Amino acid sequence: MSGIFESKLAELGITLPDAPAPAANYVPSVRTGDTLYVSGQIAMKDGELVIGKLGENISVEEGAACAKSCAISLLAQVKAACGGDLDRLVRVVKLVGFVNSTSDFGQQPAVINGASDFLVEVLGDAGRHARSAVSANALPFGVAVEIEGIFEIR
């Protein structure tokens, strides 16, 4: 039987994927005490990387959808780190969102809202978090968005 958070995901028509494997020499997450640090998750759509640059060939709405996909991958990593029990998640502490954008693009917060809004929708108050939303001239593999997270777990 799924827990409270996975039931909410199911209501939204979302099934968490398997936690993505690291793309280089790092681990997907590190736990110290009740804090879980999750490595950056990159934008995916239909199993493919979303390549592009905000302010050039990716709209704010598409960028927000990318951020949401990153948040889904973050939750998948949290679930994996919690032995398959997403309800061990106490709260999202902080997100750091990187937006591959042109030098004149200034809507990084609107893009990362795709992740923030989704996490609050699924997790309620446990999804409210501190956050940074920053521009990057380039991201790994040319992806549009990458987000890392810090979580409190039990």
Image: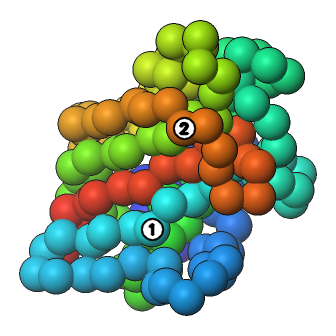
Instruction: Tell me which corner region of the image, top left, top right, bottom left or bottom right, holds residue 35.
Output: bottom left
Residue name at image x 50 percent, y 22 percent = 108
**Spot occupied by residue 111 in the image (x, y as percentages of width and height):** 56, 24
- Position of residue 31 relative to residue 9, above or below, is below
Q: Tell me the distance, in whole angstroms, between the alpha carbons under discs 1 and 2.
A: 17 Å
- Position of residue 129 relative to residue 112, above or below, is below
Residue name at image x 49 percent, y 49 percent = 147
Q: Is residue 34 left or right of residue 141?
A: left
Badge number at residue 145: none
Q: Which residue is mark 1?
A: 39
Question: Badge 1: how crowded within 10 Å, few (<14), some, or many (20+)?
Answer: some
Q: Nearer the viewer, residue 135 or 123?
A: 135
Q: How many marks?
A: 2
Q: Is residue 152 left or right of residue 10?
A: left
Asked if disc 1 and disc 2 are in contact, CB closer than 8 Å, the reply is no
Q: How is the image coloured?
A: rainbow
Q: Which residue is mark 2?
A: 136
Residue name at image x 82 percent, y 44 percent = 51
**Spot occupied by residue 131 in the image (x, y as percentages of width and height):** 29, 35
- Position of residue 65 relative to residue 57, above or below, is below
Residue 8 in sight in this render: no
